Image (cartoon, rainbow, N blue to C red):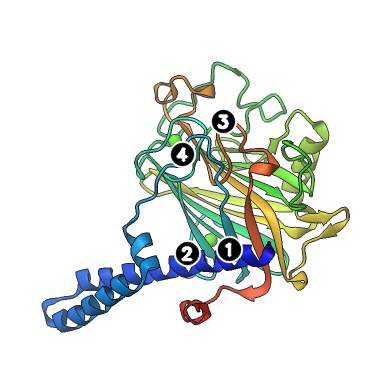
Amino acid sequence: MVSIRTASAKRLSFRRSTFIDCEGIVMNIRRSTQGGRRIAWACLVGLSVLLVGGAGCRSVAIQKPEQPAPGAIRRPITESWYGSTPVLDGVVSSGEWSDATRLTGVLDWVPEFSPVNRDNDLSVQVWVKHDRERLHFAFSVTDDRIYGVDTPRWLPPENPRAHDLTREGFPWFGDEVEILINARNRWIGNESAEGNGGAWQMVCNATKSRLGGVGVGGLLEGEPRSDSAAWDTYRQWIQSGAQRAAVRLHPGGRGYTIEWSIRFDPCLELEPGRYYSVDQGEVAVGLNLAIGDLDLPRDGTGNYGLFHHEQWWAGARGTRTQKDNFGTLRLMGTAGKPQPQDLNRAQP
Ligand SMILES: [Ca+2]
Ligand SMILES: [Ca+2]
């Protein structure tokens, strides 16, 4: 099972890198000046060979992301490679995440509320990697209206205390990103995360936080809020820096960037008292990601909390917080991200 998954993940990685190469050649042709036409034609011939010879390249380059079929469970697999430690400042600086795996969404992610039809309504680039101590994510979110900045801080009909920073509040009410980890990568039935180092669900809201209050983006205790032990654990993780995040709204509006860092100890507890270490090599954990989008109340007509969108990397509508709906994150130990030539060499 592991080898099948590994082979499948390698194929996906190869296709992704090939896609980038093809895209690069097209961009080069577009940018070439009159004096560089000869080089451009050489690239064009090369591109034709790739399109004819490489079915993987052709299928990925031409296909647009499609929305998942209703009821289908999306089960993506991705990798986190060993890389440099990013600076948590809410800015994806040049080269800072080039050694990370990059994911994109959210047209083809799972819609909990209204489906997304345009990238400029809601889209995201996600990067993931780790160093010796911590798992790092970055999210660059395009969102055409930032709740509480471009809109009033309106309240949902379900909860007039949505912005209380207590267990009665709605931590995810706003524009937000959620990370869900199942470190044990096991489940019994249809249970969701318990809210401990074995499995958890945390929130990073663009405009409110535990450390900065309402108006300042950052981490908040996630689910299950109904469990005071889970809430206390999450709060302790935020206050101790076991999880840290930096949020910055994009200059000129229409989006925000989150950098989010998670310490293996205590947040990736593979077994009671035992935490992930890169010296273990490859370990697969359960992962889900959510991008929540609140705009104006009228944009969410008919949806819970009048949410406009909530797009999920893995799972299915209505069950996406269950551990059995998560995708897979392969933590690759001390291995760095393979370069494109390594991936080409790995193909049969
Ligand atoms: Ca940064
Ligand atoms: Ca929004």
Circle 1 SS class: loop
Q: Residue at x 20, y 69 (%)?
A: 30
Q: Position of residue 24 (x, y in %)?
A: 32, 71
Q: CA distance from mark 1 to mark 4?
A: 38 Å
> Depth check: 154 or 17 in front?
17
Q: CA distance from mark 3 to mark 2?
A: 28 Å
Amino acid type, residue under disc 3 in the picture:
Phe
Amino acid type, residue under disc 4 in the picture:
Ala
Q: CA distance from mark 3 to mark 4?
A: 27 Å
**Disc 1: CA contacts within 10 A as few (<14), some (14-19) or many (>=20):** few
Amino acid type, residue under disc 2 in the picture:
Ser
The residue where tag 2 is placed is 93
The residue where tag 3 is placed is 173
Asked whether mark 3 lies closer than 8 Å to ligand 2, one says no
Identify the image quadrant of residue 118. Answer: top left
The residue where tag 1 is placed is 87
Identify the image quadrant of residue 51. Answer: bottom left
Q: Residue at x 63, y 20 (%)?
A: 161
First in sequence, mark 2 or 1: give its number. Answer: 1
- The answer to whether residue 65 of the structure is visible from this angle is yes
Asked whether mark 2 lies closer than 8 Å to ligand 1, one says yes
Q: Position of residue 332 (x, y in %)?
A: 66, 68
Circle 3 SS class: loop
